[in-house]
Image (spheres, helix red, strand yellow):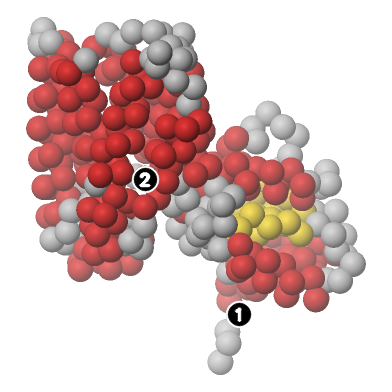
Amino acid sequence: MSSRIYNCLSAIADVIEENKDFLTDLDREIGDADHGVNMARGFHAVKEKVPQDETDIGAVLKKTGMTLLSTVGGASGPLYGTAYMEAGKVLAGKTELTAEDFSAALQAAIAGIQKRGKAERGEKTMLDALIPACETFTAKTAEGASFTDALEAACAEANKGIEFTKTIRATKGRASYLGDRSIGHQDPGATSATLTLETILKFLKEN
Amino acid sequence: MVGIVIVSHSAKIAEGIKDLAQQMAQDYTGLECAGGMEDGSIGTDPLRIVEAIKRADHGDGVVVFGDLGSGIMSAEMAIDMLEGEAINAKIVDAPIVEGTIVAAVEASIGSPMERVIEEAVKTREFHKV
C-alpha cells in the first residue's frame, strides 16, 4: 500500500499536471513559457521514482527534491528541489507531521529558496506567496488553531500573495528582462507554490 | 591542468562551443559539456553539472561557464553539492563563447586557475564592431 506522504505528493503531481497549460500561459506572459511543462515533467518523474511504500517523510521529500533537480530543467528545478530537500532534512525520520513540524519544514524550504535564488519577499517570486502563508500558518497554530484551519488561512494569504505579485515588477529571473512590463501579470512560481499548499490542504481534509 | 565545464540549456550550444574552443586548443583534453537535460530537452540539470565537473577535474581546479538564468543557478547548486570533495570549482562571470575559448587556450598552456579566470573575465570587454 502506498504511504500517506506518497499519496499527497501524487495529488500535488496531478494538480500540477492539470494546471500545466495554465502555468505555462502565465509564464508565456512574462517569462520563457516553460514553467508548467517543466513542473509537470518533474512531478511526473516524482510519481515514478519516489518509493510508494516509504513512510519516512524526510526520506520521501529528499528523494522528491533530488528528482525535481534532475528533471525540471528551469530555475524551478534548483528552487523547488532545494525547497523539498531542506524540508526533508527537517523531517528526517518522521512518519507523522504535527503543525510545528510542518511550520519548521516550510520555514526551512523558504530559507533554502531564498539562499538558492538570492531573493527576498517583494520581488515577484514564489516567496511572495510562501512567506505570508508560512507566517500565517505559524501564527494561527500558536493561537491554537487546528492544522487544517491554520493551513486554510495560510492558503488565503498565499492567494493574496499571488494578487500582490500582479502589482509589482519582477527583479529576478527571466521576467526581470521585461522591467515595468511585468506589472499586471501574476507570477507563475507564486501560483504553483499556492497550488501546492492548496493541494496539501485538500488532501488533509479528505484523508 | 585546469578543467573547463560548459553549462548550457542546449546540448547543441554546449557541444558547439566545445568544438570551437577545441579548434583553438587542439591538444587540450580538459573540456567537458553539461548541456540540456538527460532526456535531450532544453534545460539545465545540477546533477549533470556535478558529473561534468568531476570529469573535468584533474587536480588543478575547474572553471565553469554558464549561459542564462537557471544555467548559473544550477551551476551554483552543483558546486554546493560538491562540498566535501577536494575539487576547486568556480563559476566565471564571462561570456560563455569567448570566455570558454580564452580559458581553453590558457588552460592548454598550463596556466593556473587564477590566471585562466583572469584572462576569461577580460572577454567581457571584447568589442565586435
Q: Which residue was labeled with disc 2?
A: A40
Q: How crowded is mark 1: few (under 14 residues within 10 Å), some or many (20 or more)?
A: few
Secondary element under disc 1, as helix, strand or loop, is: loop
Q: Which residue was labeled with disc 1?
A: B126
Label 1 or label 2, whichever lies nearer to me, is 2
Q: In which quarter of the image is residue A21?
A: bottom left
Which chain is indicated by disc 2? Answer: A
Q: Are marks 1 and 2 on the same chain?
A: no
> Residue farthest to the front?
A1
- The amino acid pointed to by label 1 is Phe
Relative image position of residue A175 (x, y in whole percent) = 30, 61
Q: Quadrant of residue B28?
A: bottom right
Q: Is disc 1 in contact with disc 2, using a CB cutoff of under 8 Å? A: no
User: A21 or A179, which lies in front?
Assistant: A21
Answer left or right for B18 relative to A32.
right
Answer left or right for B11 relative to A25.
right
> Residue farthest to the bottom?
B129
Q: In percent of the image, x 68 and y 57: which residue is there?
A: B33
Q: How far apart are labels 1 and 2 at the CA level?
A: 41 Å
Q: In percent of the image, x 73 and y 56: which residue is there?
A: B32
Secondary element under disc 2, as helix, strand or loop, is: helix
Residue A175 disc label: none
Residue A126 seen in render? no
Q: Quadrant of residue A148?
A: top left
User: B75 or B14, which lies in front?
Assistant: B14
Answer left or right for A11 relative to A62.
left
